Amino acid sequence: MSTLKEILTRRPVAATIRLTVPAGGARPAPPVGPALGQYRLNLMAFCKDFNARTQKYKPDTPMAVTITAFKDNTFEFTVKSPSVTWYLKKAAGIESGSSRPGHVIATTLSVRHIYEIAKIKQSDPYCQYMSLESICKSIIGTANTMGIKVVKDLD
């Protein structure tokens, strides 16, 4: 249960905005500008904060960001690491998955690749309480739906 002080200090939320922005590439142009502008949020403050938080990633890495806009024109945002499918495509060196997953194998990856992706995804807010094994199982399932075969060791 929330305390009375927490309830009274909560700010009313105007909207929750979800965007995919390239790392270090937030500019007040579309898609960031119109999405934040309609809630009268400070575009340059978001761009500077986002670019500062994502400078450790390679440029043009697609970062998922969730922005909570409050009624008093302030905002908070959380940055998640890139999607599992993006990591799998980069590790496999392919542009897209199989057109017929389960029938046509696009490529193969080793369990070591899956483990490395899981270690990166473990820092995400939604995965921080999951075990590394369960994250790996989830990534293997995603790889199977993309037509990527997971093997113990690459030959």
Image (spheres, rainbow, N blue to C red):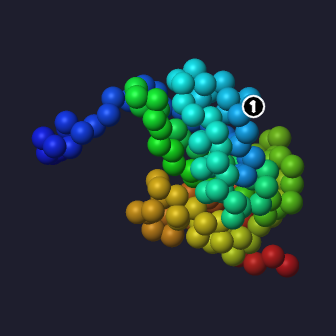
Which residue, as the protein is rendered here, is positioned at the far left? 4
Residue closest to the eye, 113 or 73: 73
At a point 53% along the width and 65% down the height, the residue shown is 122
The image position of residue 88, as x and y in percent, is 74, 58
Q: Along the horizontal axis of the image, is 17 left or right of 89?
A: left
Quarter of the image containing the N terminus?
top left
At a point 60% along the width and 50% down the height, the residue shown is 49
Q: Name the residue beneath numbered marker 1.
A: 29
Image: 138 above or below 78: below
Residue flagged by tag 1: what amino acid is it? Ala
Quarter of the image containing the C terminus?
bottom right
Residue closest to the eye, 77 or 40: 40
Image: 80 above or below 36: below
The image position of residue 16, as x and y in percent, is 48, 32
Few, some or many C-alpha atoms within 10 Å of disc 1 (few <14, some 14-19, many ≥20)?
few
Image: 152 above or below 68: below
The image position of residue 154, as x and y in percent, is 81, 76
Q: Is residue 36 visible?
A: yes
Of helix, strand and loop, which one carries label 1? loop
At a point 75% along the width and 47% down the height, the residue shown is 25
Q: Along the horizontal axis of the image, is 106 left or right of 32?
A: right
The image position of residue 129, as x and y in percent, is 40, 63
